[in-house]
Amino acid sequence: MSEPKADRRTFFLSAIYGVWGVITAALAIPASAYLLFPPRVRKTADWVAAADVAQLKLKQPEEVVFRRNRVDGWKVTSEKASTWLVKMSDTEVVAFAPQCTHLGCAYHWEDKRDDFICPCHNSTFSLEGKVLTGPAPRALDRYQVRLESGKVMIGAVERSDA
Amino acid sequence: MPNLRTIVDWLEHRTGLETAVKSFLYEDIPASSGWRQVFGSVALFSFMVQAVTGILLAFNYAPTPGDAWNSVRYIMTELTGGALIRGLHHWGASIMVVIVVLHMVQVFIWGAYKKPREATWLVGCVLLLITMAYGLTGYLLPWDNRAYWGTVVTTQIAALPPVVGPYVTRLMGVGAEGGVGVVTFSRFYALHVLLLPPLTIILVGVHIYLVRKHGVAPAPDDTAPRKKFFPEQVFKDTIAIFVVFCVLFALAVLARAPLGRLADPTDTAYIPRPEWYFLFLFQMLKLFEGPLELFGAVILPNLAILLLFMVPFIDRGKMLRFTQRPVAIGVVVLAALGWAGLTGAAIASTPKTVDIADDLSAPQTWQELAPEELAGIGYFRLESCGSCHPGGKAGAQGPDLTKGVKKTAAQLIEHFKQPARMVPGTTMPAVQLSNSQMNALAGFLLKLNEKNAEALQSAPQFAIDGAIVYQKNQCGVCHQVNNVGMKLGPSLNGLAQRREKQWVIDHFLDPAKLSPGTTMPPYKFSAKDMESVTSYLLGLPR
């Protein structure tokens, strides 16, 4: 018996390829899920009080720094975050995420021009966060906001649609 | 469109890959080769599984004490497939030890180590030791109690031999006071992932080269014409690999890899045990006491290893059939019996670990705490305060908090936020909790004393989770538990005597329906919160 017969050989070959295919799949599928699926979130973002509604001036954007807990992998870190708050009315406050939607630079409110301007590529945004000029692809992102007994409560960031 | 053949030809022309693969696969092997020669391939496969799963784990693993435990917990509970990957790595380690030993036993019984294959045997012995070293160093990496205490025992044994002992322990990064800490952890991690894997790859390469150089050892009476390695032997190897892989996969799915409590150097109640394949060594130490300990712990195992290396130089006879090797078989049987006896004795003498606090018949310390305080325990655990403030144990990093805290709640909260401002030079990290959570923690610490300190350990997690839900939703504004809270609503003590669980759940969802005229608002808790808070409330004493 020097060389197995042809059908025996075919059987060996298909068994070898089949088994290694199964083993590879059994490792690769969980591995892909493990690497690609987002972690099951334990905690949703806490609501944090960032400012008093009474202290904000109507339609006068103000940058506010607040502390919040961020869940990052296995760690919960307490970090500083900032937002541009705009009091639209006594019952409505908008909180913009502080990065330009173009490339993430920090923008600021320009009193003289009455718009938000990003120093990187001169994108400008209106008081409502809409793109006025420049390369920014969509309006400013906003934090979820809740008004509770005179406090502005900040939640998670929501991506703007357009 | 080039087909596969042209791609293979192109590669072959540039690299000679096809010739190389073919000469590897179509190696001549003795006609007597068969199922008993599969163990080497299976051992290599189990190493490859460890490498793949190890790399995957490393993508989400933080190699520092404390964080390590947290990241393993994160891998196992929050990542899809994480528990499976860790299961494969954990059980794969045991499987690898088993396969490597079986491989060695097969070679030993058949006398395949004989001239000219001595070097193959020697390299194999080193690979066995490396496999053991993986087990020893990997054991510490989850940084739970099991890991910590197991390694403490290991380092103590390493300190036994005169002259070299202190140097070995220093290499292991053990500090002057004999503690296992950050340095030991880093050393073990570096060994486990940086030194051992390349060493394994090189030595496996040498091992396979030597097997190829000398050829697979034939049976002594094998005169039949030689056959090819591929496909018949590859098929047999593949089937054996598949069987082992199925066993491993089933273990990883069905038996959860253990992750105990975060390592607690002050937990005197913990009974350290090594991994099962080291249990025989552990048990053997019990046979040798006093001055003989050195003999049992160091000299005897090293002699055994030396003897293992010397096997091809002691037994230099001609190749025989294994049925003609009663001595070799006898040695294996004796070693197996000795190993099984010692391991069995070690398992038999391991006290059952008691599952604490599942017995709710008598009121326990935690049941007498107010919900805020119980929630405080939750935050105490969440922030791992106990790893530095274990209470009443010598050698702890932080002060004993069970002796009465001499600060006001406001001072405590200030200290949580900026530890170094209240205690200059402290290494305590800032507590990462919200204000109301810090309130609960401070409230609990003020109440903490030596009598109720055991609740820190024994309070069951469901009760703590429930108390946290209770505290977050400010139930205490209307209800009393253990005489703490307001009396607008009924006291919740003894709820289990008055109501069924389903009633409590329905009542949370729509209070007005079950208690007409109530001012209690509905609470739409998540399923998990609902479960914890109802279990907690129904577990309250009368």
Image: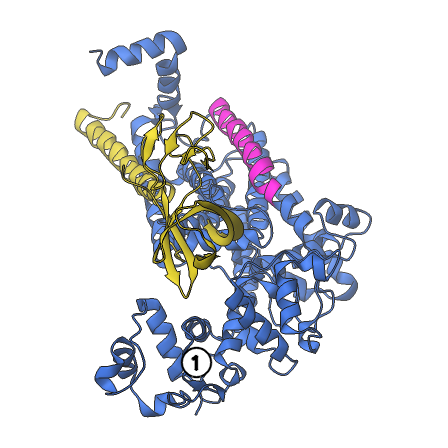
Chain colours: A yellow, B blue
Residue B201 part of the magenta segment = yes
Q: Residue at x 50, y 73 (%)?
A: B375
Residue topped by disc 1: B477
Q: Residue furthest left?
A: A7
In this rendering, the answer to whether B157 lies above or below B50 is below
Comparing B120 with B199, the one in front is B199
- Tell me if residue B61 can be seen: yes
Q: Position of residue A82 (x, y in %)?
A: 48, 46
The residue lying toward the viewer, choosing from B78 and A148, is: A148
Depicted B346 relative to depicted B115: above or below: below
Local crowd at mark 1 within 10 Å, few (<14), some, or many (≥20)? some
**Quadrant position of the N terminus of chain B in the picture:** top left
Residue B303 x/y as whole percent: 68, 48
Report helix, strand or loop for mark 1: helix
| B23 is higher (above) or lower (below) than B307 | above
Residue at (47%, 35%) from the top-left corner?
A106
